[in-house]
Amino acid sequence: MKGYFEKRDRQAGKKNARQQQIAVGIDGASSAAVGGCRWQWLRRRPAEVIGGWDDQKRPHNSPISVLKPNCEGENIANRHLANVKDLVIEDASYIILITIHIFLFGVGNVSVICSEQERVALLKFKQSVEDPFGMLSSWVGNECCMWERIQCDGVTGNVQRLHLKGDDYCLLVGKKVSSSLAELRHLKYLDLSQNYFQGSRIPEFIGSLKQLTYLNLSDANFDGIIPPHIGNLSNLKVLDLSSNYYENFLKADDMAWAFSLSSLELLYLSAVDLSGAQNWDMMLHMIPSLKELSLSHCRLSNVNLGPFPNSSRILPNIKHLDLGYNSFKGPLPGLLQNMTSLTCLSLSGFNLSLAWNFPNLLSMIPSLSELHLSGCRLDKMHLSSPHLNYSTLSNIQHLDLSNNPLGGIFPSVLTNMSSLEVLDLSDTMLNSSLPIMPKLLELHLSSNKFKEIEDVGIWRQCHLKQLRVTNNLFRMEMTDPPKNASECSQYFLELLELSQSLNGRIPETLGRLVNLRHLDLSYNKLTGSIPESVRGLRFLQVLDLSENQLTGPILEFLGNLTQLALSSNQLNGSIPESLGKLVALTKLYLRSNLLDGTIPVSIGQLAKLSHLFISNNSLEGAVTEAHFANLSVLKELDASSNTKLTFNVSRGWIPPFQLIYLSLSSCNIGNGFPQWLQHQRKLKRLELSNATLSGPLPTWLRKMPIINFLDLSHNKLSGSLKNLPNAGNGDVYGPFPALLLEYNLFNGSIPRSLCRRTDLEGLDLSRNMLSGKIPNCMGNLQGLAIMSISSNQLSGAIPSSIALISSLFWLNLNKNNFTGEVPPELGNLQGLRVLDLGDNKLYGNIPNWIGKKLTSLVVLSLDKNNFTGRIPPSLCKSSNLQILDLAYNNLTGTIPPCVGNLNGMVVSHSIYEHYPDFDSDKNVIQVMKGVDLEYTTTWSMVYNMDLSSNKLVGEIPVELTALSMLVGLNLSNNHLRGGIPESIGKMMKLETLDFSKNELSGRIPSSMAALTFLSHLNLSHNNLSGQIPTGNQLQTLIDDPSIYAGNKHLCGPPLQNTCSNHQDSTTTSKKKHKAADEKMEVWLFYVDIMSGFGTGFWGVIGVLMFKKQWRHKLFMFAEETMDKIYVAVVVRVAKFKRGRE
């Protein structure tokens, strides 16, 4: 969340500037100069005027009050003036009446005495709400007419006006609106807008305040049906029930109650669900006084159109009508042509591409001066009709065509609009040069496809006052105007936004834009130094150059600046002393640069400074009371990540400010825990991480109001947790509620008082010395998303009450002394993504329900426990698992082949895909490369399976090799048999592989040489044999013979056992196969001989045994043959003897 506050304020500043330029004109002139629909810019609304959304999910041009209500207590006249500006009404006489009324009664408050009955009613209201910012802090004593935000009748003392409008820095939180307000029977003005009433109903008693002329309940988080009792307010002139909350919707089932509001002039119902409401279409006819009506985002459709849409009855008073972002289709309602005075119309989000064309609309309503058609699916054909009435076109002063696929060339019809002063063509796919439009004052061209910066006409549109061209990736850098281009003798440009569009250097020619008040070049790729010409812009009030690559020192700017944002660059040198002369400066952002040196004491003279962000630099030296001497309105201070900076203020110092946000993380805080914090009663976010704090928490801290986001991690704080802030209740409207105390020396038990923090969404107590049991009441923390209590000395059973926290996303109880079985109730945590119960004393089987119920699990760590039994095949149903750690247990059986179904280890995904608001700075400990590695910000990129040190048997399933995203695989110290699968070469992302201390046999697959990321391998102490494969990544491991030790039949480098002829493994393999083939041939030869002999021998002998006659003849033949041979031999011998004689 670093930078969130700065980013939010930059955006709010842009919106405020935008609103000021529309509502009152940038030069202070009346908004009539730009014309039309002024009410749309006076407060926050959904995207009813100009489409698109900023990072805070609000419309780019979503209005915010020009004058923010001040919780510090402005003087009464200024406060009432702000409310007049909030209530801009077309009827000039009504404005004058209200102004006189405010002036008279603003003065009258000084002397009148309020009614005791009304004073008690106001105090009851105060007691019914939480006031974290002190909006009602002045409501003490007897004179309630002197209280801030209250105005009384100057004669009777009756309360007539309640100005309780909230904002981001000052709001009320309540479960409902107290009925005590019904006692204020003379109330004429009630504004509860922009507070937080937690989805409660609009109270019915509002209808009893019959004197009301102004009622504003907008953006206050009301829900449910609008009570028809509001119809009793017959004097009401302004009613605002619109909303910016999309989790809660006000609804109406019948709008007939509005018919009684006979004096109503302004009715705002944006984002009120009217889809089921009857009679809404009759309001225009039944409330003749109505002048402005907003029905944007009301879920209306043609079905809701009643019998009046084509009525011929004239509606002369309606001037402003907003029907944007509903679900109308087909032709426009005919009643539009009956609005003879209609000057402002919004049909944004209305799909009109097939139902009508541009000329029809203009001819239907010739009185229009402002028209909003954002997101209407219009293309250039709709703007190129030959039937256009150019006399009608000349009336249009403000035209919004944003978010339409106009494409390519600038629509020529727009050049014929001679009165056009405001034109919005954002997100229309334009890519051509714009013509000169002499009367144009405001031009929006963001999110288009311009290629050249000159296409938008910065140097040609001489009379333009506002130009916004964000999110256009220009090919060339912004340079001086071309010599052949017509330059202006004078430029009137006052606002220039070119963020997310530029590269190169900032040109010196920007100095020609001498009237610039607002310059935004943020989020670009600008390089070089800040040019001197920018320093010379004497009217400049807002300068935003953040998120670039600018270098060099910070210039000495002129004294009119109110906001200076230079964050996230490469600026160097020291913070100039001259910044202390910028007396109008309210916001200063210098974070994430290369600044060094000391902080100038002159900063303490910026009496209007509310935001100071200087974090993530190399600032040094001591910060003392003098640096804050006159910073009485400072709200947010971030000096974190300046490791040489020391905050050294006296223990008795009382600051002049009341901070909402303070971050001194990674700084040095002298004199122990800051004593001056006990005077900061409005803190909503406090970050003192890694700030050299030590010792116990001070006792006064317990009496502090609960701080929504408290980070005291990475210090040496000790003692009990009982002194944590505990006064009041957590603010559900504040920043992400979290308590971060990890990496300290806290001891003792987890206090039960912590269970009162029902607002918490993040809790991290890890890396302390806490003992005892987890309190059962922790189940009360119903909003908790992250719970990390790892690395403590907690014991006992894991409480089943944790299962009551249905929102739990991350549960880490690693490294404690928990015993017993895993509570089956945890199976109810179906949104759980991380479950880490490792390094405890848990026992029993791994529950089947983990795989069946916790199907969203990304991390499951049960290592270093006493689990027994088999690995349940149901785990294979956890298709999102990317880390599975079951090491160091007593698991038996085989590895389920279904592990190949763990799709989370095959396809890359993000654990925060559905939780974009959660900070990913959480740690996961995994055994990688043979050691325990703690992954913090990068853990989500780790895919690991560790089943080591169990009693697993059987073979390594070949299906395991399909897990292609695995970075680490550890099956060591088991009883696995068989060979290493040849397909292991498919696991291309493996960095660490450990099969050691098993009973594996056979060859090492040559495919392992394809594992190009492999940096840690251990195959020792198995029964592997043959030549060790070489080549590719395996060559980098050749210096470590221990990874193959204990395999007596392995040979080749890096072992000393050499293989014959020093053959490589491939050649050896071929020759072994050839030798085996030769042995087979010899064996077959002898088999042939024996089978031939047997066949021949038993073929003859067998026949003689069964044929007696054959046997006799054979013997007779043999006897006769032997006799003949004998006689022949005797005769031959006799002849031989006679011949020798």
Image (cartoon, grey):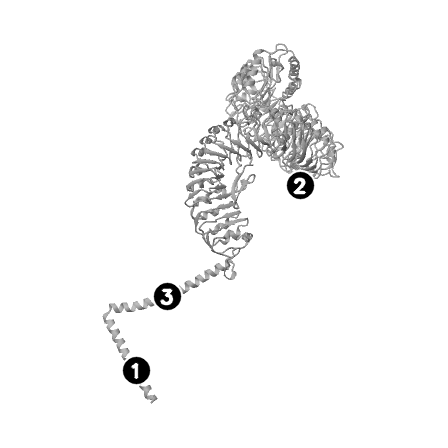
Residue that label 3 marks: 1088
The answer to whether one can see residue 17 in this image is yes
Residue that label 2 marks: 475
Residue 989 x/y as whole percent? 53, 47
Measure the C-alpha gap from mark 3 to mark 1.
Answer: 38 Å
Residue 1086 x/y as whole percent? 38, 66
Measure the C-alpha gap from mark 1 to mark 2.
Answer: 119 Å
Image position of 421 with respect to 849: above or below: above
Identified by mark 2, the residue type is Arg
| 592 or 483, nearer to the observer | 592
Tell me the quadrant of the picture where the C terminus can be found.
Answer: bottom left
Residue 971 x/y as whole percent? 47, 46
Residue that label 1 marks: 1128
Identified by mark 1, the residue type is Ala
Marks 3 and 1, the one that precedes in the sequence: 3
Marks 3 and 2, the one that precedes in the sequence: 2
